[in-house]
Image: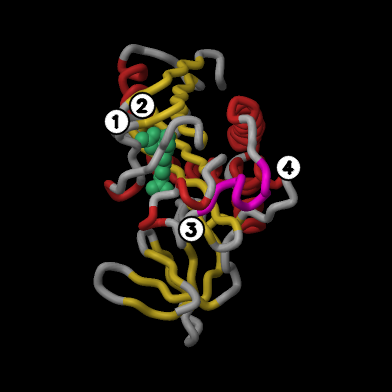
Amino acid sequence: VGRDIFHYEQVSSTQDIAHQLAKEGYGHGTVVVADEQVKGKGRMSRAWHSKRNEGIWFSLLLKPELPPVQAPQITLLAAVVLAEAISSISDLSPQIKWPNDILINHKKIAGILTEMQAEQDQIQYIVLGIGINVNQDQSSLPEDIRHKATSLRQESGKTWEINWLIQLILETFENTYEQFIQEGFLPVKNKWEKYGYRLGQEVTISTMRKAWQATLVGIEADGALLTRTEEGIQEKLYSAEIHWGE
Ligand code: BTN
């Protein structure tokens, strides 16, 4: 990972560039970093605010020799990597909100966007996009998300060296990914559950059609969230939102 690193001052989205590089034949582990994205992309077609030098905005090109059903494991792995990296450099307690938001003190500090190209039973490539809010102060976070977003600086009280952090994350990723390829998903699952937000607790879960109360039990190898209702019925969820405190 990181043998080919492309660094840009300004791009529309590092995701788009990584897709382009994949098509040009660049290999597993190629990294695209930007100081600023003018069209940063979040999940569910949301925008991702990525101002100059305020955070880490990068995409990782991966070519795992795995079937497409295992792609969600790599997203969950990336969340574990971010949680471990943040824990290792601070006394903060990052948590992972399923599927893959990183929270500190209940506020989102980082997000992951996975885009896959697959053919039948084989992943062609994955573009794993990682965005981490690092040096924003309260006022430089967009007003509409200020109440639910945070940055490393706001939580730790100090500013951070972006390039050093990227290096640390790439190293942590490399080790965790290597272990995943050698030993499979179980070590990732165990670590994910160590950081899992509200695991064992009752939350409100909602989909487009309904909302209900359930306890979060854990994750499954296919990336599903395992939940249990008060009546003891277990259910696997593939897409839903988790809420709390309402
Ligand atoms: C989310 O939580 O919605 C995912 C956010 C992912 C943002 C990163 S920043 C680097 C990469 N390039 C993008 O345009 N998006 C991802």
Picture quadrant of ligand 1: top left
Q: Is mark 4 within 8 Å of ligand 1?
A: no
Residue indicated by mark 4: 88
Q: CA distance from mark 1 to mark 4?
A: 38 Å
Magenta region includes residue 153: yes
Image location (x, y in percent) of residue 166: 59, 29
Residue indicated by mark 3: 98
Other-residue count near label 4 (Cα within 10 Å), few / some / many at <14 / 14–19 / ≥20 = few
Image-quadrant location for residue 95: bottom right
Helix, strand or loop at mark 4: helix
Residue type (three-letter) at the residue carrying disc 4: Ser
Of marks 1 and 4, the one in the foreground: 4
Q: CA distance from mark 1 to mark 2?
A: 7 Å
Helix, strand or loop at mark 3: loop
> Which is more toward the observer, 106 or 24?
106
Magenta part of the protein: which range?
Answer: 150-158
- Residue found at x 31% / y 17%: 23
Q: CA distance from mark 3 to mark 4?
A: 21 Å
Residue type (three-letter) at the residue carrying disc 2: Gln
Counting residues from the start of the chain, the first of labels 2 and 3 encountered is: 3
Image location (x, y in percent) of residue 159: 64, 38
Residue indicated by mark 1: 119
Counting residues from the start of the chain, the first of labels 3 and 4 encountered is: 4
> Which is more toward the observer, 122 or 240?
240
Other-residue count near label 2 (Cα within 10 Å), few / some / many at <14 / 14–19 / ≥20 = some
- Residue found at x 31% / y 68%: 207
Image location (x, y in percent) of residue 54: 50, 36
